[in-house]
Amino acid sequence: MNIYQDIILDHYHHPHNQGRLDISGKSVQVSNPLCGDKIEMTIVFEKNKVKEVKFQGEGCVISTASASMLTDYAKNKSKQELKKLDSKFIIKMLGIDLGMTRIKCALLPLEALHKLL
Amino acid sequence: MIDLKKIRKEFPIFQNQPELAYLDSTATSLKPKAVIEKIREYYEEYSANVFRGIYPMSEKATVEFEETREVISKFINANKSEEVVFTRNATESLNLLAYSLGRKIIEDGDEIVTTIMEHHSNFVPWQVLAAEVGATLKVIDINDHGYLVINWDEVITKKTKILALTYVSNVLGTINPVKEIVIAAKKINPKIIVIVDAAQAVPHTKINVQDLGADFIVFSSHKMLGPTGVGVLWGKEKYLKEMYPFMYGGDMIEEVYIDHSTYKDPPHKFEAGTPAIGEIIAFKEAIKFLKKIGMENIRDHEKKITDYAINRLIDTFGQSIKIYGPKKIEDRGGIISFSLDKFHPHDIAQILADNGVCVRAGHHCAMPLHTRLNVPATVRASFYIYNDEKDVEKLVEGLKKVNKTLK
């Protein structure tokens, strides 16, 4: 199955929640040195729930689309809910079949999010 | 001239995958029938251990095993086959040198010199050794065209004990003028030991260690049509004799007492434990295969196909493709690393893979070089004796699809 589906490419070309929150939010940087992907994620909570989350960095189609979709999903979710997310969720969210190498690209944004919780 | 049609027939993988465009021989090469058949022969006909049994099967295995050493020795024009040590791969050969030679001769305040274009295996062992003993690691830089820039008087001093450099960059393709570098380095410091990572050179061009002037060269079987699990360390006998053993145990021992042990002479001193017998036996078939085609013919073919590929890529993609390394084809091996537009190398490699083209994406175990080039990763296409213009066309078509998909 082709992983470059229209919805994935749409998130890649027009990522949601791109940028950086300047206000007193938490921030984290994660990277995959093997392919040079880097993501910085910033987050603001309100009463244990995600009020705002943004990401920026360099990444491939898969990591960018994953970050875009994940940040959309994370809004208004509680820390407890987000802590439960795993690779199965990410694969389902992206709706594509990823091989052993590319799954790492897809999981990078989740790693960032989990570090912020 | 080489007969590509005839050569491709010798590689069973093309019968199994007729549409395969394999452009990743820098990572590992495909294997000809003769090599695969020889491995089968060992396991089915005389699969005994070497140097042990008195029975005929073990003697046959030992003869076949040592014959490979002889074939390698002649192939690189070593003085004698005892200068050829078997390891698992070029990486192990380099680690062996850092351990058995490096820890013998490098002291606090000494200098080790390497280059920015090294594979991690010829960089990290020296970095770690230097930190461990208090030596200085000096790194030779490159210019924008991918050539080494050597300020001789600054780089090599009387304190320099080891110069470790690659013959051919696995990313830039740059063929370093090793012979001239050895002469210049030894002129400043006659005692300097020069170690050459020839993993990307021995498979592709004629290497004569007498002419080269280096003290050690290393390479891997699997990059030159041979089996995986076999590396070579060639070194001058006087150094091999002085060096520490690498690993202790079976096969490398002469005598063991409660309070001390004595060791065999090189090369066996460095070959502890049961080696990859079948693979080493089959490795000589790879060398015979290469010799039959002729190393000059192989180099000519790779020059032609690389030149063709570079021209096709630039004609088709113009300004949006950036090819790293020397422009002069004489100075470049069959390796083309590139960036296309702003596309991520993983996406490029993925779309090429979906179209039957095998390339490598990443930093190719050369992170200091990619940092120097100011890119996190590149895409690499590399060529060998079985690649033809059709493979190049598939690469070009695949890259057009990348443009179409990601633009």
Image (cartoon, rainbow, N blue to C red):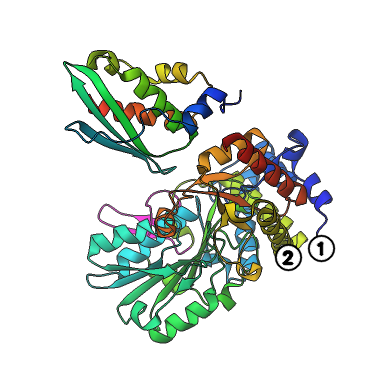
State whether the magenta stretch is mostly helix, strand or loop.
loop
Quadrant for residue B253, please give it.
bottom left
Q: Which mark is residue A74?
A: none
- Find residue B171 and report its horizontal and vertical position in percent: 52, 56
Amino acid type assigned to the residue bearing label 1 in the image: Met
> Mark 1 belongs to which subunit?
B
Residue beneath the point at 29% across and 36% down: A20
Amino acid type assigned to the residue bearing label 2 in the image: Asp
Quadrant for residue A46, please give it.
top left
Say whether marks 2 and 1 touch (CB < 8 Å).
Answer: yes
* Mark 2–mark 1 distance (CA, rounded to whole Å): 8 Å
Q: Position of B18 compared to B352: left or right?
A: right
Residue beneath the point at 26% across and 24% down: A52
Q: Which mark is residue B1?
A: 1
Q: Secondary structure at mark 2?
A: helix
Residue beneath the point at 60% across and 36% down: B351
